[in-house]
Image (tube, rainbow, N blue to C red):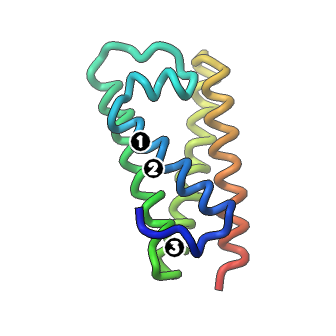
Amino acid sequence: MPSTASLSPALRAMAVSRAFAGASSWISPRHAWRFFLLGPMPDAGSTALVSRLFGIRDLVLALGLGHSDPAVRRAVLTAGVVVDSADVVATALALRSGAPRAGLLAAAAGAGTFIVIGATALAHSD
């Protein structure tokens, strides 16, 4: 990952969290499902595909936060706020459909935290 030394502690934590979630979801979807409390991963190959699609998205967002150009970091923060907002909506829809609550509530809390961190950073950026 590019240097995160110039990031605030909150943005650095977000970059590291996104990198972990992204890399673990890409490398081992089954273990990521367990770690993120989503229950046992269904055996359908499409489930691993969707996990890896999520994984690469979060990994790219993490890498973008470490970019040296402030305009790129601002664009990545904006994209992250949009993506995390959509994640909260997707979580609400999944809960309505009867998906396991524990993991989904944790996911919504994580996305909500990233929305606040990202929006705050955007409000204080040049």
Mark 1 to mark 2 CA distance (whole Å): 6 Å
Residue on which the image places disc 1: 54
Check residue 73 in the rendering and tell me which mark sits there, or answer none: 3
Task: Give the number of the disc on residue 24.
Answer: none
Q: Nearer the viewer, residue 58 or 78?
A: 58
- Residue at 30% from the left image edge and 32% from the top image edge: 49
**Residue 32 location in percent, x, y?**
45, 29
Q: Give amino acid for label 1.
A: Phe
- List x then y, in percent, for residue 97: 58, 19
Q: Secondary structure at mark 3?
A: helix
Eyeballing the image, is 44 above or below 56? above
Q: Are marks 3 and 1 in contact (CB under 8 Å)?
A: no
User: Where's residue 9, x and y in %?
Assistant: 68, 63
Tag 1 near tag 2, CB within 8 Å = yes
Label 1: how many Cα within 10 Å (few below 14, some 14–19, many 20+): some
Which residue lies at the image location 40% right of the left edge and 36% below the top edge? 25
Q: Is residue 10 left or right of 63 when viewed as pictured? A: right
Which residue is found at the position 68% from the left and 29% from the top?
A: 105
N-terminal-most mark, 3 or 1: 1
Q: Mark 2 = which residue?
A: 58
Instruction: First in sequence, mark 2 or 3: give its number.
Output: 2
Look at the numbered disc 2 and give the secondary structure of its residue. Answer: helix
Which residue type does callout 3 highlight? Arg
Q: Residue furthest left?
A: 45
Contact between marks 2 and 3 (CB within 8 A): the answer is no
Q: Residues within 10 Å of mark 3 (few under 14, many from 20)?
A: many
Amino acid at the residue labelled 2:
Asp
Residue at position x 46%, y 58% from top? 61
Q: Position of residue 82 (x, y in %)?
A: 56, 57
Helix, strand or loop status at disc 1:
helix
